[in-house]
Image (spheres, helix red, strand yellow):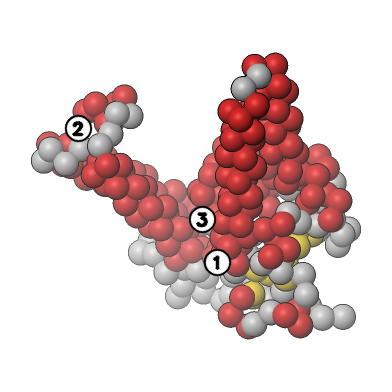
Amino acid sequence: MQAPLYARFYRRFRGIVVDWIIVMAVTFGAIFVAITIGNDNFSRVVGFLVVVALLLYEPVLVSFTGGTFGHYCSNLRVVDERSGGNVSFLKACARVIIKGVLGWYSFVVLAATRRNQAIHDLATRSTVQIRDPARAHPGQYITERAEVAAFGMPSRLRRAAIICAYLLLLVIALGIVVNGIVMAGVLSDRCLNNDYCSGGERISVLVTGVTLLAMTAAVIALGWKGRLIGARKQ
């Protein structure tokens, strides 16, 4: 049997984008229909059905077919680590909830795991694999990474402690940068505290958030591979 092929982040991101487009299309389609009909009771029913459908969209498709439309378009499948088949409905629900709470930060541990798993994958003992290897290119997946515990590698506990220390320093540095941005007038207190932001301020917030996300992922990946000062591979 061919070894499992675990999807890289950009393949998963492509699937997320497809699902997001579907969600937006359904949402705006429902709003258009409700406005066209112009009946309050009908609008409430449509709104309720749309909310239920969107909440169940991923859990139902993942548990019964192995993936959403986004997964299918990206040639991906969600697999239960224990059975090798589809995850249960409860696990699929748990995946959605954890992703909803953590957002993009669920993906920061990908490079530090053997099977390119996000936090919601690890928590539910699942993986995201290539559905049809014949349609995949080598750059779209990885095979299982060797355990990062080679000779001269610091212990897991030490690596985890160093990663946490670096992340703490990163948060402190972010606070200093944000304070500097506010003092420079690029970001107003109203935007920072009340979310009343201009277009330029929203761009600044977005850039800061993406930078923090990328740096967090880099710290975790480098730390787990023994490349950070304090827990380097000998």
Label 2 and label 1: CA atoms lie apart by 34 Å
Q: Residue 199 appears in which quarter of the rendering?
A: top left
Query: Which residue is labeled 2 in the image?
Result: 188
In-front residue for pair 79/199: 199
Q: Is residue 203 left or right of residue 68?
A: left
Measured as percent of width and height from the top left, residue 185 is found at 12, 38
Q: Amino acid at mark 1?
A: Tyr
What label sits on residue 10 in the rendered view? Answer: 1
Q: Which one is in front in this view, the residue at disc 1 or the one at disc 3?
A: 1
- Relative vertical location of residue 109 with respect to residue 1 in this rendering, above or below: above
Q: Residue 97 appears in which quarter of the rendering?
A: top right
Determine contact: label 1, label 3, CB under 8 Å: no
Residue 164 visible in the shown view: yes
Label whose residue precedes the other's in the sequence (1 or 3): 1
Measured as percent of width and height from the top left, residue 30 is found at 64, 35
Measured as percent of width and height from the top left, residue 43 is found at 66, 23
Determine contact: label 2, label 1, CB under 8 Å: no
In-front residue for pair 81/160: 81
Q: Is residue 225 left or right of residue 142?
A: left
Q: Residue 73 appears in which quarter of the rendering?
A: bottom right
Q: Residues within 10 Å of mark 2 (few under 14, many from 20)?
A: some
Q: Amino acid at mark 2?
A: Ser
Label whose residue precedes the other's in the sequence (2 or 1): 1
Q: Residues within 10 Å of mark 1 (few under 14, many from 20)?
A: few
How many circles with numbers are drawn on the protein?
3
Q: Quadrant of the N terminus?
A: bottom right
Query: Which residue is labeled 3 in the image?
Result: 108
- Relative vertical location of residue 141 with respect to residue 119 in this rendering, above or below: below
Q: Amino acid at mark 3?
A: Val
Residue at horizontal 48 percent and vertical 63 percent from the top = 221
Residue at horizontal 58 percent and vertical 50 percent from the top = 20
